[in-house]
Image (cartoon, rainbow, N blue to C red):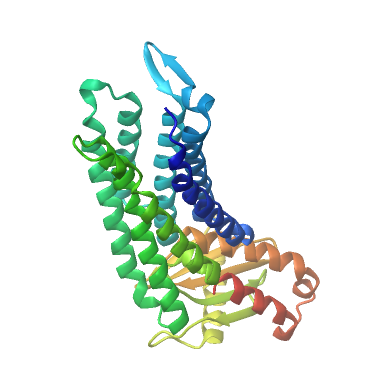
Amino acid sequence: MQQPELIPILSLPVIISTITMIVILNTLRKTRPVSAVLYGVAALCFLGMSLGLLLDQAYMPFREAYVDVNGHVLWWSNTLNTIFIVTGFLAWYLAIQYSQHEDLPNRTLLVTFFVGAALFSELMKMDWSGFMPLLVEIPAFGIMIAEIVLYAFRVLPLAQHGGVKTRAQLYFIGLVVWISSAPMGIILPNIEGIPDWTANVWTIPYSIGFLMISIAIATEPTLLFISSARVLDLIVLDRENTLVFIHRFRELSGSVDPELMGSAMSGVMSLMREMLASSRQLQRIDHGDVKILFEPGPLTTFLLVVTQETARFRHALRALQMEFETNYREEILSKSPFMEVYSKFRDRVKEVFR
């Protein structure tokens, strides 16, 4: 039986999810790393979930639609909502991981297993196995919440500036409040003896948390990709390994002059080209807490000095190199000695790696 009185309650997550989806997609327009795609998938999934729950109460044909799988009835409303919820949370979790790591840590496989098991058990549960999803969902969401809290403790100290620090705190508090809606909406209704009104309590933390996330991201888009990894220097060499462009983002204790570093890397590249018979290009140099990422191209070689390699840095480096060679082809080929000709590119570099 439909419950019209629930429509206003369930409309709030739809409105908030729409706002959040717009904010995230607007933030991702200029960047396409793996984490950005995953954030977009998560936003669409949560909007789909919110719409599905609203239609389940407002549109009877949607609520009554089902498919029979070998005598097991799968209601479309329940099935789609379960898929959206699980996929959305998993996509957001993986996006956070890809923002920090080039290669995902092994514990990600454990979380993915629990989430996949939760999806399967929720779809296939019978009367006798109604408790099984709870056994999987409780540790799954517990691990995900713990991961987000630990992630916040790692990166919050890096947001030192007043405005950015405040928005970063708002983002992480909103993230924890929002994800707490998952156990409320999925686990509580499956516990016997719990009052019926608790079934919709999840809409409160869901809406408040997502609204806090939207405000934080709208005012500081880089919060989606906040990480302990930091960019130190960008160095550009031409085909003869002559220094073409250099930009220093921040100083490290004991770091050398950026131009001296560029000259040294030019010598290293020339030496390796002479000594090594392999046709494979150098991809990275590790030296303690500093890593140098190499991105060779037809006209230039880009070197990005970072504290930690991430998929976002690698993708941004590749995109910047293609953009540089396209916009400054004539200057590169003419071997212009004046770095002032690349002043607009310096602004672009600051925008990408801010």
Q: Position of residue 336 (x, y in %)?
A: 76, 81
Q: Position of residue 83 (x, y in %)?
A: 43, 35
The residue lying at 41 percent from left, 22 percent from top is 74
The residue lying at 45 percent from left, 86 percent from top is 251
Work out whether 77 lies above or below 159. above
- Furthest toward the front, the residue is 5
Q: Give the position of the N terminus as an image quadrant.
A: top left
Quadrant of the image occupied by residue 85: top left
Q: Give the position of the C terminus as an image quadrant.
A: bottom right
Number of numbered labels in the structure image = 0
Quadrant of the image occupied by residue 344: bottom right
Q: Could you say which is closer to the camera, residue 307 or residue 12? A: 12
Q: Position of residue 299 (x, y in %)?
A: 70, 65
The residue lying at 80 percent from left, 76 percent from top is 334
Residue 180 shows in the view: yes
Q: Could you say which is closer to the camera, residue 78 or residue 297? A: 78
Q: Could you say which is closer to the camera, residue 94 or residue 200? A: 200
Residue 279 shows in the view: no
